[in-house]
Amino acid sequence: MTHYKALMMLPGTPGDESQIRQYVKKHISKFSQYTIIEDHLGSIFAFKKGNGNSKVMIAGHMDEVGFMVVGITNQGQLNIQPVGGIDPKIVLAQTYDIHTEKGIIKGYIGAIPPHLNLQQNVDFEKILMDIGASSKEEAMTLGVQLGDRITFEPRFEQLTEHRFLAKAVDNRYGVGLALELIEALKDQTLDYDLYIGATVQEEVGLRGAETSINTIEPDVFVALDASPMNDASDDSDNGLNKGFLLRMYDPRNTMPEYLKQNIASLAERHNIPYQYYISKGGTDAAKALDMHRGIVSTTIGLPARYIHSPAAIFDKRDLDACFNMTKTLVISLDQTKIQGLKKGAFHVL
C-alpha cells in the first residue's frame, strides 16, 4: 500500500497536480524498460514498445476535488469556490489546507452553534473560510492570494484488516494502480505498444484525457477510477468486497454489449470478482469513446464510500481485483484481439 498512502496524502487539485506528477515521473524513471511520454497539459505516461503497431493506453487521473480562494473579505475571511463536484453541505465543521506561496496554512469552515439560533448558509457563494486573520491585510500577510488552492486535510488510516480510510481515493487509486502495473509489467513481452500513466484535470471536464489521447492515439483505452458506493445505508447490489466495478452505463458512456461480454468472460475465466455498475458520473473513458473515430474504451472501477468528501473508505480486496483484472487484460491482449474488439466482436478475450 506504499504508493497509495503516499499519493493519497499528497495534494493535487485540477490544474495543480505537480506533486503527483513528480511522484509518478520518479517511479517511471526507475525502469529502463520504459520511456516517459508527457503532454503540455501535464499528463504523464510510461511507454513500453511492443512487437506490433496497435496501442493500449491505461490511465488513472491525478486530480482530486478541492477548492480555490476567490475572495478575501475585509474581516480576513476567505471566499471559496469548488474545483470539481463537491456538495456544499459536507464542507461545514472541517479543517482545510490552504496552499500559499509561503507554505500551507490552516483554514476552518465553521458550523454556527445552536445557541445563536441562526440559519447556516450552505451555498458556496456565502460560505466563508476562517484562517484566524482579523483583516484582509493580515490574511495577505499570511500569504493568501486569490487563486490559492485548498485541499481537505491529508489522511490515510487502516480501519480493519482489509479496509482503509483516506483522502483523495478518487483518484489516487487509479494513479497508484498504474504505478503497480508499470513495475509488474516491466519485463512482459507484448504484441502492442503499452502506455500506462496518469492524466490531469479529470474532475473539471476530462481535459487531460483529451490531450493525452490526442498525443498517443490509442486503439484501446482503460480508465482506472473510483466510484461511489451507498452500501453502508442501503440494500444495494453494489458494495465493498464484491470485486471491481464493470461500468455498464454512465451519462456519457454506454458499454457496448460485445465489450461487456468480453470483459466479464475474461474476469470469470480467471476467477476475478466483479460487479455490474451503473453510474451518474463519468470517467476519462467517456472522452476516449468519441475521439478518433471511436476508441474501444472501458473503466475498471474501485468501489469506495463517501468520495468527493474529506475522506473515503475502500477495501483492499476490491483493489486486488482491480489490479488482477487490469494486468490480466493487458497480458491477454494481442494484435488480433485488439482488431477484433475494434470491429465489435464477441468472444475475443
Image (cartoon, grey):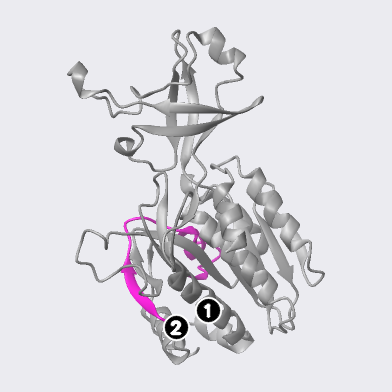
- Determine whether label 1 and label 2 are within 8 Å by CB: yes
Query: Vertically, is 110 above or below 220?
Result: above
The residue indicated by pointer 2 is 272
> Picture coordinates of residue 158 (x, y %)?
47, 59
x then y, percent, for residue 189:
72, 84
Residue at point 39%, 73% (across, down): 246
Q: Position of residue 270 (x, y in %)?
A: 48, 89
Tell me the amino acid under the disc marked 1.
Asn
Q: Is residue 41 visible?
A: no
Res 179 label: none
Out of 61 and 192, give the one closest to the viewer. Answer: 61
Residue 297 sits inside the magenta stretch: yes
Helix, strand or loop status at disc 2: loop
Residue type pointed to by label 2: Ile
What residue lies at 64% left-to-right and 53% top-to-bottom? 43
Residue 116 in the magenta stretch? The answer is: no
Towards the viewer: 155 or 346:
155
Instruction: Tell me what residue is drawn at x 54 percent, y 52 percent.
Output: 8
Local packing at callout 1 (Cα closer than 10 Å; few below 14, some 14-19, many 20+) is some
- Mark 1 vs mark 2, CA separation in Å: 7 Å
Q: Nearer the viewer, residue 191 or 266?
A: 266
The vertical placement of 317 against 338, above or below, is above
Magenta-highlighted residues: 273-298
Q: Under tag 1, what secondary structure? A: helix
Q: Which residue is mark 1?
A: 324
The residue positioned 50% from the left and 47% from the top of the image is: 155
Q: Earlier in the sequence, mark 1 or mark 2?
A: 2
Q: Is residue 180 visible?
A: yes
